[in-house]
Image: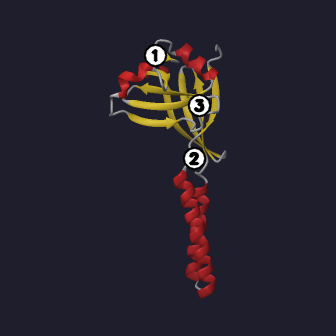
Amino acid sequence: MDKGYYEFLVKGKPNTGAKIGKVVFFLLAILTLLAALLFGSPILIVVTIAFGIGAYFTSGYTDVEYEYLYLDKELSVDKVFNKERRKHADTFKMDKVQIFAAEKSSKLDNYARVTDLKVTDYSCPDENNGLKKFVMIYEGGRKIYFSLDEEMIKAFKNTTPRNFSEY
């Protein structure tokens, strides 16, 4: 890959906490609305509106995708919420990568015993989607999971051939 730029989008793990929060807020909004109609309380109407707003805002975090942007030996990861909002998650410089290997690679055996690595998962939960799961050990004691396609794998192999392992 000679272009030095590659962009790739993967579906992230579903945020079950946000889904549960959305359902709880929605049910509480319905219950307080019924109570407000039954008792005629204006305070309960305000509480109903507050629960409705809570349900609206928690629903914005239920669907997460990760966008990998590789540009000039730098990998940037953004979180995309509900295909609407974007938040920058992380940036990695390829010269600070200690090892970049497939998840089942024997090159990661030395790091399996290290327990103080900070683990971050930017991978796809579905393993039958044609993507390969990779692990990056990054300077500063970080272990990051990615789901990559063949073009992105080629880009990393060309950038960090000494630290990269597909097997």
Is residue 35 left or right of 108 when viewed as pictured? Answer: right
Instruction: Identify which residue is drawn at 62% across, 77% down.
Output: 33
Counting from the top left corner in percent of width and height, residue 166 is at 53, 18
Q: Which residue is mark 3?
A: 68
Mark 3, mark 2: which one is toward the viewer?
Answer: 2
Q: Which residue is mark 1?
A: 163
Q: Quadrant of residue 116?
A: top left
Residue 14 — which label?
Answer: 2
Looking at the picture, does residue 2 appear above or below residue 10?
Answer: above
Give the mark nearest the N terminus, 3 or 1: 3
Amino acid type for the residue under numbered disc 2: Pro
Q: Quadrant of residue 21?
A: bottom right
Secondary structure beneath dot 1 equals loop
Residue 40 visible (yes or no):
no
Secondary structure beneath dot 2 equals loop
Pick whichever, 26 or 85, lies toward us: 26
Q: Residues within 10 Å of mark 2 (few under 14, many from 20)?
A: some
